[in-house]
């Protein structure tokens, strides 16, 4: 059932990410099983630098998910004192290992290290985050390759919940390299679940609410807690909260919860885009394995 975009005074319909993620991960598990039946065990390698508790926790979650799906999950934990060259050597080893199909460097890394330089070292075809410059170029040109996980997750979420995007006005508040910019490229592509008229606006524009108030689909991607309030939303619009910050372990979303009083449909504060991001990481990983053995 599609979500219409029309004025409403009712509480918005929620667009949870969990069922979307479950659908994607079911497909991934089937693909992993097919690869293993053919004698190939997909492997998603992880790299953790330092001893940040939250980052270590995220790695454990991803390793558990990898095991449930049937992936091998080799892991390297470097000390916080590791040099840029130490990190590059680990990535070069994973690049050279034909048994490793995808690599994830847990972000953030210690401040004395350069994440972008490390990303440049990684084989683009093993980049499960979809953030390597080569993969961003592939996205811009509409070529096959790993997609940035959060933008791809948002497209999948909208499609799963029947939100019409093709031919409609999508406004993205935020121009960051991990979400706003790649999402704009993704949703503008000619595809039934995309093909939108996309506007990217940001907090450097003094009258940015003028743009968000006309959006049929509004994606908040600014990383500024509570920046989107009811007066910034067109009545009946679909609102997706993509941007977040953390205060310790407390999640602070861009979209104020009161926007549900104006929107026609909205992602929940917790369990919206996040689960789809993780699911897309594993979709990128299994597709990398398929390409490596000539199935993709």
Image (cartoon, helix red, strand yellow):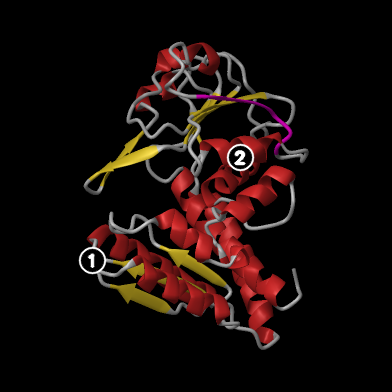
- At horizontal 47% and vertical 52% (from top left) the residue drawn is 275
Give yes or no for residue 2 being in the magenta stretch. no
Residue 1, placed above or below residue 262: below
Q: Which is nearer the N-term, disc 2 or disc 1?
A: 1
**Real-space CA distance between mark 2 and mark 1, rounded to the nearest whole angstrom:** 39 Å
Nearest the camera: 168 or 5? Answer: 168
Instruction: Specify whether 210 is left or right of 124.
Output: left
Give the residue displayed 63% in from the left and 54% down from the top: 135
Q: Residues within 10 Å of mark 1 (few under 14, many from 20)?
A: some
Q: Quadrant of the N terminus?
A: top right
Residue 26 drawn at (x, y percent) = 59, 64
Q: Which residue is mark 1?
A: 51
Asked if the residues shown at circle 2 and circle 1 are in contact, with their CB atoms under 8 angstroms apart, the answer is: no
Is residue 176 at all visible to an observer of this figure? yes
Which mark is drawn over residue 120?
none
User: Magenta residues, as a range?
Assistant: 194-201
Badge number at residue 161: 2
Question: Along the horizontal axis of the image, is 100 left or right of 222?
Answer: right
Magenta-colored segment: predominant secondary structure = strand
- The residue shown at (56%, 37%) is 181
Image coordinates of residue 278 in percent, x first then y, are 48, 57
Please provide percent x and percent y for residue 2: 67, 33
Q: Position of residue 174 (x, y in %)?
A: 48, 30
Q: Image point 43% across, 75% down: which residue?
A: 89
Element type at mark 2: loop
Q: Nearer the viewer, residue 141 or 73?
A: 141
Quadrant including the C terminus: bottom right
């Amino acid at each position: 059932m599609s979500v219409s975009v029309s004025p409403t005074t009712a509480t918005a319909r929620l667009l949870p990410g969990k069922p979307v993620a479950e659908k994607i991960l079911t497909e991934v598990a089937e693909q992993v099983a097919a690869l293993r039946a053919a004698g190939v065990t997909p492997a998603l390698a992880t790299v953790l630098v330092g001893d940040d508790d939250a980052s270590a926790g995220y790695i454990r979650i991803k390793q558990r998910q990898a095991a449930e799906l049937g992936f091998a999950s080799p892991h390297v934990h470097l000390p916080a004192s590791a040099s840029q060259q130490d990190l590059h050597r680990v990535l070069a080893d994973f690049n050279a290992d034909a048994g490793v199909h995808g690599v994830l460097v847990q972000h953030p890394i210690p401040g004395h290290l350069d994440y972008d330089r490390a990303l440049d070292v990684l084989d683009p075809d093993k980049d499960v985050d979809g953030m390597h410059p080569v993969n961003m170029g592939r996205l811009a040109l509409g070529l096959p390759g790993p997609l940035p996980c959060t933008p791809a997750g948002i497209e999948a979420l909208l499609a799963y919940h029947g939100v019409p995007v093709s031919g409609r006005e999508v406004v993205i508040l935020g121009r960051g390299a991990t979400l706003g910019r790649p999402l704009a490229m993704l949703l503008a592509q000619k595809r039934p679940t995309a093909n939108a008229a996309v506007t990217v606006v940001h907090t450097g524009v003094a009258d940015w609410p003028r743009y968000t108030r006309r959006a049929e689909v509004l994606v908040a991607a600014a990383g500024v807690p509570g920046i989107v309030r009811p007066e910034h939303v067109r009545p009946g619009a679909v609102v997706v909260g993509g941007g977040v910050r953390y205060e310790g372990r407390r999640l602070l979303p861009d979209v104020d919860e009161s926007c549900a009083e104006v929107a026609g449909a909205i992602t929940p504060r917790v369990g919206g885009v996040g689960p789809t991001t993780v699911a897309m990481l594993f979709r990128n990983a299994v597709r990398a394995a398929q390409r490596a053995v000539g199935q993709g």
